[in-house]
Amino acid sequence: MSRSMTGARMVVEALRDQGVDTVFGYPGGAVLPIYDEIFQQNDIQHILVRHEQGAVHMAEGYARSTGKPGVVLVTSGPGATNAVTGLTDALLDSIPLVVLSGQVPTFMIGTDGFQEADTVGITRPCTKHNWLVKDTDSLAETLHRAFHVATSGRPGPVLVDIPKDVQFATGTYVGPKQVEPARYQPPRKGDVGAITRLAELIERAERPIFYTGGGVINSGPAASQLLTELVEATGFPVTSTLMGLGAYPGSGKNWLGMLGMHGLYEANMAMHGCDLMINLGARFDDRITGRVADFSPHSVKVHVDIDPSSINKVIRVDVPIVGDVGHVLEDLLKIWKSRGRKTNPAVKQWWAQIEQWRARKCLSYRNSDKLIKPQYAIERLEALTKGRDRYITTEVGQHQMWAAQYLHFEGPNRWMTSGGLGTMGYGLPASIGVQVAHPEALVINVAGDASWLMNMQEMGTAVQFRAPVKQFILNNERLGMVRQWQQLLHGERYSQSWSESLPDFVKLAEAFGCKGRQVSDPASLDDAIREMIDYDGPFILDVLVEKHENCFPMIPSGKPHNEMLLGDLEAAEDIGTAIQSDGAVLV
Amino acid sequence: MSALKLERGASSHSAYDLRDYHAAGEERHTLAVIVDNEAGALARVIGLFSGRGYNIDSLTVAEVDHTGHRSRITLVTRGTPAVIEQIKAQLGRIVPVHEVHDLTVEGPSVERELGLFKVMGGGEKRVEALRISDIFRAKVVDSTLESFVFEITGTPEKLDAFADLMRPLGLAEVARTGVAALSRGR
Ligand SMILES: Cc1ncc(C[n+]2csc(CCOP(=O)(O)OP(=O)(O)O)c2C)c(N)n1
Ligand SMILES: [Mg+2]
């Protein structure tokens, strides 16, 4: 039904019609009319953040853990520019977001007015699409389109810039159903011929592997179920990127663990040695491929992706299938079953080979009874939280990789980390976004000391909205990942990688009105973790860990998969020379 | 070795994909991109090229369907076959882009460009300039006692050749539209 109302009211109306229950935002002059409308209703809760970057990461956490788009509201100028990092993060990790920004009134655009910024210009390269709305009559339609674009095809962030006069003026509201169907309709079904080809390859392969990514998660829980069914039915090994963890259960018997730069030895060796690689919703990122020229040299490569531009971008594949992973898996299972569910008996020998690689136990580390090893801290966290209704977020650095290696995820949407952009400061706000969406769940941010400080102001948000998020800080008093690279690549010259003058995290917790504890003795770690879990409110656990621990396995930049460094097994000197200058130029 | 014996490109449905993907050489391709004529559409296309480091040799744009508000962007770009494939896929991803045509591979096409050339001078050179312009079927669209402005339509190569000949004869200024292109036949 078309109704006449102000632009500001349309915003709230459209959000309601899109099923939005939560908005993360921060007010300012150019969005006051919208905030006035938010004040006068109760359907949509508004989470007041402390910095707009926090709002966007919260919306990302919300989106990833629910599968619904996250919604953000910011003011013009600095409000919008503060959102840029989060938008870029969401673009690289394909997270659906709808960001609404205020803008100076249309008649002032271009005059360098107070808090004017060319928001659509600035955010054009870091959104999937964006709009500047110039008249109130087109506002409702634009908002509905924004939701459609953010959530269709490969999901991503969109931004709608709304000048203040457009918010004040009256126009005609249209509901989502009245908007004519969008032309933007990415195909979901994959080509049946190509899928049949894949089924044939599955029947014949001797050394197959499933290489799965964030696309499986984005496709929805059904895709994860279909993946699990296919993996079990074929008996093939499965590995995943950082973004895809949880699509196949971490306890599943065919699970090889994460692959890539800090992936497991068996996963990377299997990728290198396979004869059939089935890429489901991953994108051959450089953290995964290592040296491209030597990437999995003997395999036939199949790539299922909803975005045609991902195909052949980095690695030339033999069988491209453009489509939604869930739909393709459904068709594949049907076709493969109807052809008699065949696989090659030689896969047994492949598993024997994989077991040999597994026997290297690449995640083993030397534990200590004096110092808490970061790996041990994560292992204990896993042991004490396993089986609970648990969501994990992370910051960026060594702790993030250890979390990916030592935690196990039994289902999708339980693991939120900044993969593509590697944004320090992501984890704390993301944990709040997750908690807002799942108030009863246990939400833990596995953090590094340095990253955590980047958006620590959001503890105020957690306290205000009673989000009992657990901040599990692996405190090595270092920018650990930077320190590791300097040790391995820059002659142990530790330039600016110390976290000097760290705050007292326990006092900080108290200052924010929540609780904190510091732990440094391995014998009290379990007790500290239990206290953190049981505390009814936000909690900061400052875990003082070994300061110079390195994260292994590691494929140095510019090296192929079969030239991994395996921590303990390698003498430190070998590691120093393992990285050649041609690799050093890579990040 | 692999038990699978799959030929490269065997899954392809288009003859285009059978070209040697790893060819080192750069190719010149003319692309026609049909977009909604909305604010920022051109900026998105240009931003894609600058952001991802692709080349633009020539670009023209104008609304070609006033009722449907569609613009046609004609782009001449260079790159290896892999890069050209990426460019097309990336263009196709832009939300207001409706169609991307690679006129270089989709069959025969015609390319035309319009140029205006100002030639200054007198005496013999002036006569020679006029004579050559006649050979090229250029039109004189402005004339003073010491200058001509010639208008010429043709392929970019023809315009280049004309400019080369006019340079010693007093070529002072050039304005070119960039390439417009259409496929031949249906
Ligand atoms: C915003 C931002 N700035 C810089 C970096 C580069 N960087 C990657 S990891 C890292 C160190 C992180 O230190 P910490 O959070 O303490 O984690 P640790 O590696 O010690 O576990 C830095 C500086 C980044 N990823 N993001
Ligand atoms: Mg640290």
Image: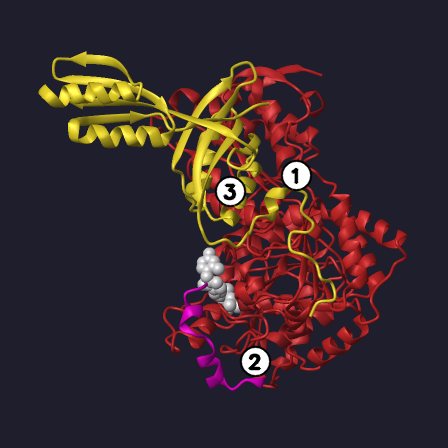
Chain colours: A red, B yellow
Residue A96 in picture, x, y percent from top left:
62, 42
Please report, as a chain letter, where disc 2 is located.
A
Judge from the rendering whether residue A228 lies leftward or rightward of residue A494; answer left or right.
right
* Disc 3: CA contacts within 10 A as few (<14), some (14-19) or many (>=20): many
Residues A377 and A236: in front is A236
* Disc 2: CA contacts within 10 A as few (<14), some (14-19) or many (>=20): many
Residue at mark 1 shares a chain with residue at mark 2: yes
Judge from the rendering whether residue A173 lies leftward or rightward of residue B71; answer left or right.
right
Instruction: Report if the beta carbon of the residue with label 3 is closer than 8 angstroms to ligand 1.
Output: no
Please report, as a chain letter, where disc 1 is located.
A
Helix, strand or loop at label 2? It is helix
Q: What residue is shown with label 1?
A: A151
Q: Determine the residue positioned at 70% across, 28% down.
A: A17
Q: Which residue lies furthest to the left in this view?
A: B123
Q: Which of marks 1 and 2 is nearer the N terminus?
A: 1
Q: Determine the residue positioned at 25% across, 29% down.
A: B163
Residue A442 in picture, x, y percent from top left:
71, 58
Say if the magenta span includes residue A582. yes
Q: Is most of the magenta stretch helix, strand or loop?
A: helix
Q: Determine the residue positioned at 25% across, 14% down.
A: B140
Distance Cα–Cα, label 3 vs label 1: 24 Å
Q: What residue is shown with label 2?
A: A567
Disc 3 or disc 1, which is closer to the eye?
3
Residue B186 in picture, x, y percent from top left:
59, 23
The disc placed on residue B87 is: 3
Tell me if residue B21 comes above or below residue B176 in the rendering: below
Q: Kindly identify the amino acid type of the residue bearing the numbered disc 2.
A: Gly
Judge from the rendering whether residue A334 lies leftward or rightward of residue A524; answer left or right.
right
